[in-house]
Image (spheres, helix red, strand yellow):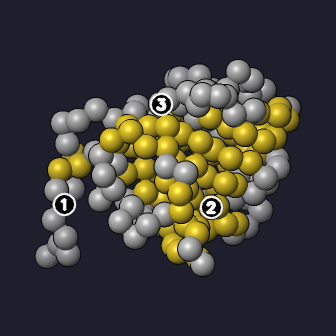
C-alpha cells in the first residue's frame, strides 16, 4: 500500500532542465563569463539575473559533466515551477549547502525532503553524487528563485523542475 498518493505532473509550464557540465549544457549560463574546462573562472552574478538559467557567483572550474566551486560561492536560478531537484556531489565529504527560496530562509511549506532547518536556516547536507530535493512539490507554483550557498568543492551537474496537481 502506498503511504501517499502518487504525484501527478501538471500541464503547466516549467523551466527546462538545466545542465552545468560543459559537454551537456543545452542552455548557456546566465553569466557573461563562460566556464572553461580545467581552469578556475571568477563568475559574477548578472544584474538582473537571467531567468530560466543557472547564474553562478564565485570561483568555478568547468568540467565535462559538472561545474565545481573553488571558493564560497552561490548558484542562483530564477525558475518557473514548484519542486526542484539538483544533481550535486561533494568529493571532499559531507558539506552543508544553505538553501534560500525567493531570497528567504526555507519555511516548512516549501522544504524539500533533503532540506532541514538548522537555527532558522535551510540546510542540505551534500555527501554523495545523487539527486537532492531542496524544494518540495508542495511549494506554490509560479516564478521563484532558488539560491544555493555552497562551500568549495561542491559539484553541480543539473537542476530540474516539476509542477504537480494535488
Residue 126 visible? The answer is: no
x then y, percent, for residue 1 = 14, 76
Q: In this rendering, is residue 66 above or below 23?
A: below
Q: Earlier in the sequence, mark 1 or mark 2?
A: 1
Find disc 2 in the rendering and name its residue.
98
Residue 17's image quarter?
Answer: top left
Q: Earlier in the sequence, mark 3 or mark 1?
A: 1
- Residue drawn at x 44%, y 37% as measured from the top left: 79
Q: CA distance from mark 2 to mark 3?
A: 21 Å
Find disc 1 in the rendering and name its residue.
6
x then y, percent, for residue 138 = 29, 59
Front of the two marks 3 and 1: 3
x then y, percent, for residue 141 = 30, 46
- Residue drawn at x 37%, y 51% as measured from the top left: 83
Find disc 3 in the rendering and name its residue.
52
Q: Quadrant of the C terminus?
A: bottom left
Q: Earlier in the sequence, mark 2 or mark 3?
A: 3
| Label 3: which secondary element | loop
> Are the residues tagged 2 and 3 within 8 Å (C-beta)?
no
Amino acid at each position: 500500500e502506498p503511504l501517499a498518493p502518487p504525484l501527478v505532473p501538471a500541464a503547466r509550464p516549467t523551466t527546462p532542465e538545466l545542465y552545468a557540465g560543459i559537454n551537456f549544457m543545452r542552455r548557456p549560463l546566465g553569466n557573461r563569463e563562460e566556464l572553461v574546462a580545467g581552469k578556475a573562472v571568477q563568475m559574477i552574478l548578472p544584474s538582473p539575473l537571467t531567468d530560466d538559467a543557472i547564474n553562478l557567483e564565485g570561483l568555478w572550474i568547468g568540467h565535462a559533466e559538472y561545474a565545481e566551486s573553488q571558493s564560497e560561492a552561490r548558484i542562483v536560478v530564477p525558475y518557473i515551477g514548484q519542486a526542484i531537484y539538483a544533481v550535486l556531489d561533494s568529493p571532499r565529504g559531507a558539506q552543508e549547502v544553505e538553501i534560500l527560496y525567493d531570497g528567504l530562509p526555507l519555511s516548512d511549506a516549501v522544504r524539500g525532503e533533503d532540506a532541514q532547518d538548522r537555527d532558522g536556516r535551510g540546510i542540505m547536507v551534500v555527501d554523495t553524487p545523487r539527486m537532492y530535493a531542496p524544494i518540495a512539490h508542495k511549494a506554490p507554483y509560479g516564478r521563484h528563485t532558488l539560491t544555493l550557498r555552497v562551500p568549495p568543492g561542491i559539484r553541480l551537474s543539473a537542476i530540474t523542475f516539476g509542477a504537480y496537481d494535488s
